Image (cartoon, coloured by chain):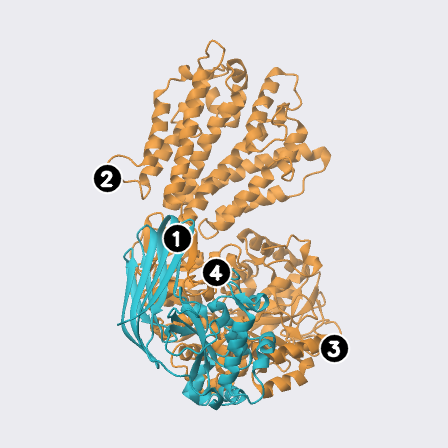
Amino acid sequence: MIYETEHATTYLYSGPVSICHTEVHLTPRSGPGQKLLSHSLEIRPEPAYSVTREDYFGNEITCFSIQESHETLTVISKSEVEVLVEEPPALELTPGWEEVRDEIRGRTTEELFEAAEFTGRSPMVRVTPEFARWAGPSFAAGKPIAEACMDLTHRIFKDFRYDPRATTISTPVEEVLKIRGGVCQDFAHLMISGLRSMGLAARYVSGYLKSGEKTRGAEASHAWCAVYCGEFGWLEFDPTNDLMPGGEHVTVAYGRDYSDVTPVKGVAIGGGEQLIHVSVGVGVRG
Amino acid sequence: MTAIEAGEGLNSAWRYTPRAGFHDEMFAEPGKTRAHWRALAAVMNGLGPAGLDERWTEGRRLLHDHGVTYNVYGEQADGERAGEGGAGGASRPWPLDPLPFLIEPAEWAGIEAAIVQRATLLDRVLADIYGPQTLLRSGKLPPELVLEHPGFLRPLWGAQPPGGRWLHSYSVDIARAPGGKWWVLSDRTQAPSGAGYALENRLVSLRVLPDVFRGCNVRRLAGYFHGWRDALRRLAPKAENPRIVLLTPGPLNETWFEHAFLARYLGFTLVEGGDLTVRNNRVFLKTLGGLLPVDVIVRRQDDTFCDPLELRPDSMLGVAGLVEAVRAGNVAVANALGSGVVESSAYSAFLPVLSRHILGEELKMPNIATWWCGHTAAREWVLANLKNLVIKPASPAVMFEPVFGAKLTASGRAELVGKVRANPGAYVAQEQVALSTIPVVGKAGSGGKLEPRHLVLRVFAAATGEGWAVMPGGLTRFTSGADSLVVSMQRGGGSKDTWVLADKPEPAFSLLRPAGAGLEVNRATFDLPSRVADNLYWLGRYVERFEMQVRALRAAPPRLYQDADPASRAALNVCQRVLSKAVHLENETQPSMLTEKDVVELVAGEDDAAKQRIGLRGSVREIHRIAWLLRDVISTDSWRVLKQLEQQFSATPAPDALLMNWTQDLLDRSVLSLAAFSGLATENMTRGHGWRFLDMGRRIERAVQTIQLIRRGLGFDAREAELGLPTALEIADCSLTYRARYRNTMQADLAFDLLLLDEGNPRSAAWQFAKLFEHVEQLPESHPPAGHSREAKVALRMLTATQLVEAGELARADENKRLARLDEFTFQLLMDVTTLSDTLTRVYFTHATQSRQISSR
């Protein structure tokens, strides 16, 4: 399947911004299951300085600064991505979750060393007994890891309500656990906190979702998580939609949490009040 | 153990009992000093306790005059300090003990080698963490220790710091255990502090104990600082004459004094994050003259706060875009951003292995035994042996005060065990060291009695072209009590100068550079950040405003007791009206005669917010506050003058009977202090932008005050104004000139001419305008393509107005006996002066525009 995505972000300020430094994670990464065919980034006004490089996690990142006075900033990212449509693996065949946990602790291979990056506390993820207690019921002794993760995915979908007004960008994940509501970013952080508190490796995935009647999170940028499952590698789970991505999700970037892969972030000098408008469109080519 | 009598040590005038079970630095055994202390002991015997105390009074005065302080954070838990006004960021005088800590040459050589080895090792560890990470992959360093450390800055991974070096300065706390061996307690790799205090300690002890110093062959510190400065210069990516700035979090930081002191000593510009900006991926300093490129940033700010874009987004102290400029190699930061990741006690558990692995050497100075609880075996051992251990955080991710296992209750221990088991990687356990002791002079002078205190020595190293240079000295800090083992300036500990002894006298350090390394003549003294210009301008204004208050108050006392005399009544009226606005007299709405009580209260009373009264004490404090912000740019002498002024005003007033006399005396001395301050500025300050803004502040304020003296003090009733003329002339310090010109004939037009129009009189308004015009013509933004700048036009308009008006016109009353023309004329001048001040603010001081975060979900 080939998707055409368009992700537009517009900032409107009540006063002039004299300078702004911005960093964007908007280029879909290529990897197992997907291939980037083309990408373009349109920035208005024209940046005085711009550089594109790979970040610590191998995502493409663009840093730019605008040095002329402006009251509107627009960033439009367009891409064509080929996504493999895959059947999810047989969950019952994945190794027992304790086995994977102990393997991560042992850290004998390069792959396991890379997983170590996604096992601990990070700016928006907590590793605490409280999260272990919450996630625990999904992790019966000897349960295949992917089954346990799917169970947790299902519980989040069932027990938490999707409510954009319940949280903001800065709501801590402990709070999400209490208020039992939020949006895709919150659910991803919640699930990752649960998994890491169980001793597993889980990373945050940011991307897009083809809009459908049953799915949520397609109107803006979407987020879900990936879990290290031993010989099965990294398997993905989307707690917002109670499913494992398999053809309708486009991965843009991954990191420890949202703070590593924020789609657009920046610092502006001046500007007064600001209004942000974000729109995401995902279409199928041909 | 008995007190010392005499012998190979101190004579019977001194009493000291070392603590049993600890290594004492001065005494090998009671009564017997160690060999390298004998020269000092001999001097102490010669001086006697009284002689030492006398010299030390001088030492304390120097520290006070130099304004050596450190800031105390937050509220103190223990009650004894709360009373000292120690709440929220108060600054404390720096506690220095008169007796130095002596270290013999052979011992120092060992310390030096160990510190160089450790600095080298930590630098190599950093290069691995931010590069191939082989130490993490092999498990020689547990990955979670690094990966979960908030100081591991992923945006810096793969960055190439200049010369491949991450550390440029390094400090380490070491202590001596019973048996005499030194142990490493902790490392500082981010922004090591204390070197400036060590230098200040030296400056004071040199002044107070010069004879002892010379007699002991003490190694000097200046060479270390110059070497460090040269090394920082060489870090510049390309510039031949690099611009180096010292980045400080600001005056509320614990060691702000040191930032200002070092910036001055090393000749760097002291900047806050807001003074810097990134354009085209280069870092610039915002100065009056525009943006100037910065080549090297010596940072005294934690790295996570340095860039709100890529590091902590909630930081208000950072420079957006700095990380990208660093990555591109366009600016060097020392220490490199990210070097805080090895600043953790947990590393001590792994350094012995890392030293063997990386350097192929054993550690030359051992760490105190350290266990990282992230490893199961270590954790179980720690939990079984808690009572002998101190528990500390493994990284700043989890912050808490060190917990002494021996002091835990059963429930406290159970709680701690639970916490460690829940998150073992966050905890480190260390052995408790029985720190050595050293004799210390008591707070109120010795009286011959010395007390043992436990000490920790901080040693400093700086990267040089060849390797590392260790400062031959250090910062010795000691505990607040004999039985405490926690060394902390925050908790009332003290410090000592550290004398590293040499076998033979050291050649005096020469500031002259070797041949072939000459500098070019440079007349631009330094780049003035806009923020500093702003502060200088307001220092000028406050000093001048204060002077007017003092002069108005000084005119009152002689007349207070003759209120029947019409001339005296008129004079008091003038004082009253001038002061009513200047210092917020409470009864300003219904003017009554100024009384003795008013005068005393304004001089010696505290500000009273309820009555909206701000007296001289409040004004002096404000001057002192601004001067404090300018520590790195105003001269030590100027600082001392202002410091003395503040001291005079914080002194306790005399008893009632002498109160008026005390008050008058204080006012007289204030006028002298102000004259000294002006004199220093006039005679000693280089005519750069700094001086210009200070002087513009003074000129503007003096113009305002002189005009207000006429508008408020005299008023526009012709008859009343005439009665007040002698007092107005006196307050403006023009009586002498007037009498010399016109004898005793008091005539309004002559007085107005002298006060407002006479360009030859430095206290007239016209003189201020002439000077202001000269100043604004020299400002960096003052050259529009054609004609004068806006500031210059305003100054010129005021100057011309005073040149064109006739004095007689101003003194002419209308049919209502009102000086209407004077009112109109002075009102216009007042408007113009205000416009000039506003324009300067807008053009030159708008440096503090808020930045804000933008991000989207």
Judge whether B766 appears above or below B493 on screen: above
Q: Amino acid at mark 4?
A: Asp
Give the label on residue B785, or none: 2
- Give the left or right position of residue A76, taking residue B348 as reference: left
Q: Nearer the viewer, residue B318 or A202?
A: A202
* Colour displayed for chain A in the image of the structure: cyan
Instruction: Indicate the chain on which mark 4 is placed.
Output: B
Q: Are marks 3 and 2 on the same chain?
A: yes
Chain letter of disc 3?
A: B
CB of mark 3 within 8 Å of CB of mark 2? Answer: no
Instruction: Report which colour depicts chain B.
Output: orange
Q: Can residue B220 be seen in the rendering of this structure? A: no
Kindly indicate whether the residue at mark 2 contacts the one at mark 4 (C-beta within 8 angstroms): no
Q: Which residue is mark 1?
A: A269
**Where is residue B329 drawn, in percent x and y?**
32, 67
Circle 2 SS class: loop
Disc 2 versus disc 1: nearer the observer: 1
Amino acid carrying label 2: it is: Pro
Q: Which mark is residue B410?
A: 3
Q: Quadrant of the N terminus of chain A?
A: bottom left
Task: Answer few, some or many: residues within 10 Å of disc 2's Cα (few below 14, many 20 plus, some between 14 and 19).
Answer: few
Examine the rendered structure and indicate whether residue B284 appears above or below residue B584: below
Left or right of A237 in this view: B582: right
- Which residue is tagged 4? B314
Q: In the image, are marks 1 and 4 on the same chain?
A: no
Judging from the image, mark 2 belongs to the subunit labelled B
Give the class, few, some or many, for how many residues have Cα within 10 Å of label 4's Cα (few <14, many ≥20). some
Tell me the residue at 47%/90% (across/down).
A93
Question: Label 4, label 2: how many angstroms apart (C-alpha)?
Answer: 43 Å
